[in-house]
Image: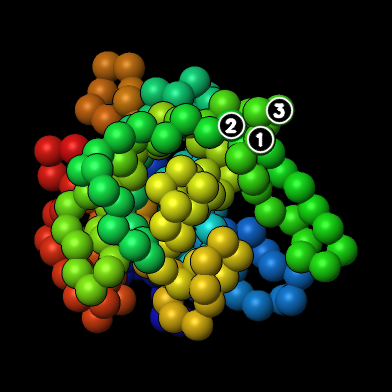
């Protein structure tokens, strides 16, 4: 994987939004393969400090990832995520076509683990609150293009809500669906408010894997 300088969607003195490629972990994996950390030194753009990721995207999820360029900004941005004032929009292709055009999935999520399957998230009344708005954009060959707008930020929230809320796993999901093809989940839009300044925000174009699956659209979430 080449350097990530050409993946910068937004940059100013406080923040960078990267269009993270699918397959690149944010945190260093146990298998020793490359992660975002290996590229941070090339993303300083004249600053001495390396930028730091403010949140996480799964390894197989592409799209908008926020990096803070100094510790004070990191603290403010992390607080915005914690307070739920950040706007996030994801696009995914799911296996199946929901009957409705839109809706709200309200399924609390809980982490479970077993020796055979490792850990995963499941819908559980005893879990943490998780709410996702969704809208069907297109359908093709028994699959649908869905825009997901999460109101909370739980681990694997959209992946589990697609499976257990819509009854349609995300295409290529190695944990909650059928592996064997690229996972079609993309963080398309991210906006973080700032006091007295314009928000930090960007739109990440859909990767080629969506077009290859028959869902190549410039901005499927426009107006969401």
- Report x, y in % for residue 134: 31, 41
- Report x, y in % for residue 14: 39, 37
Inspect this view and state whether residue 71 appears: no
**Badge 2 local density, few (<14 within 10 Å), some, or many (20+)?**
some
The residue where tag 2 is placed is 108
Task: Please state if 32 lies on the left or on the right of 104 as rendered.
Answer: right
Task: Please state if 79 lies on the left or on the right of 195 as rendered.
Answer: right
| Image quarter (top left, top right, bottom left or bottom right) of the C terminus | top left
Kindly identify which numbered label has been placed on residue 135.
Answer: none
In the image, is residue 76 above or below residue 123? Answer: above
Task: Please state if 10 lies on the left or on the right of 84 as rendered.
Answer: left
Residue 44 sits in which quadrant?
Answer: bottom left
In the image, is residue 110 above or below residue 80? Answer: below
The residue where tag 1 is placed is 124
Of the numbered discs 2 and 1, the one sitting upstream in the chain is: 2
Residue at the image position 33 percent from the left and 23 percent from the top: 194
Residue at the image position 23 percent from the left and 74 percent from the top: 141
- Report x, y in % for residue 161: 48, 45
Q: Secondary structure at mark 1?
A: loop
Q: Secondary structure at mark 3?
A: loop
Residue at the image position 46 percent from the left and 72 percent from the top: 172
The reply to whether callout 3 and callout 1 are in contact (CB within 8 Å) is yes
The residue where tag 3 is placed is 126
The reply to whether callout 2 and callout 3 are in contact (CB within 8 Å) is yes
Residue farthest along the top direction in this orientation: 196
Residue 138 sits in which quadrant?
Answer: bottom left
Q: CA distance from mark 3 to mark 1?
A: 5 Å
Q: Nearer the viewer, residue 209 or 96?
A: 96
The reply to whether callout 2 and callout 1 are in contact (CB within 8 Å) is yes
């Amino acid at each position: 994987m080449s350097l990530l300088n050409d993946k910068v969607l937004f940059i100013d003195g406080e923040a960078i939004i990267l269009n993270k490629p699918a397959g690149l972990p944010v945190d260093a994996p146990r298998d020793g393969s490359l992660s975002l950390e290996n590229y941070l030194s090339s993303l300083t753009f004249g600053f001495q400090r390396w930028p730091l990721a403010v949140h996480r995207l799964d390894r197989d999820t592409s799209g908008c990832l926020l990096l803070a360029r100094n510790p004070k900004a990191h603290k403010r941005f992390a607080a915005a995520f914690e307070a739920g004032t950040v706007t996030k929009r994801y696009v995914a292709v799911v296996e199946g076509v929901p009957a409705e055009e839109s809706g709200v999935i309200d399924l609390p999520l809980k982490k479970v683990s077993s020796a055979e399957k490792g850990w995963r998230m499941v819908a559980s009344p005893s879990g943490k609150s998780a709410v996702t708005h969704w809208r069907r954009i297109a359908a093709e060959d028994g699959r649908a293009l869905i825009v997901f707008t999460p109101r909370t930020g739980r681990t694997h929230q959209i992946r589990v809500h697609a499976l257990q809320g819509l009854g349609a796993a995300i295409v290529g999901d190695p944990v909650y669906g059928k592996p064997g093809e690229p996972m079609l989940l993309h963080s398309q839009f991210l906006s973080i408010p700032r006091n007295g300044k314009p928000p930090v925000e960007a739109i990440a174009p859909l990767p080629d894997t969506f077009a290859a699956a028959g869902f190549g659209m410039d901005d499927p979430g426009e107006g969401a």
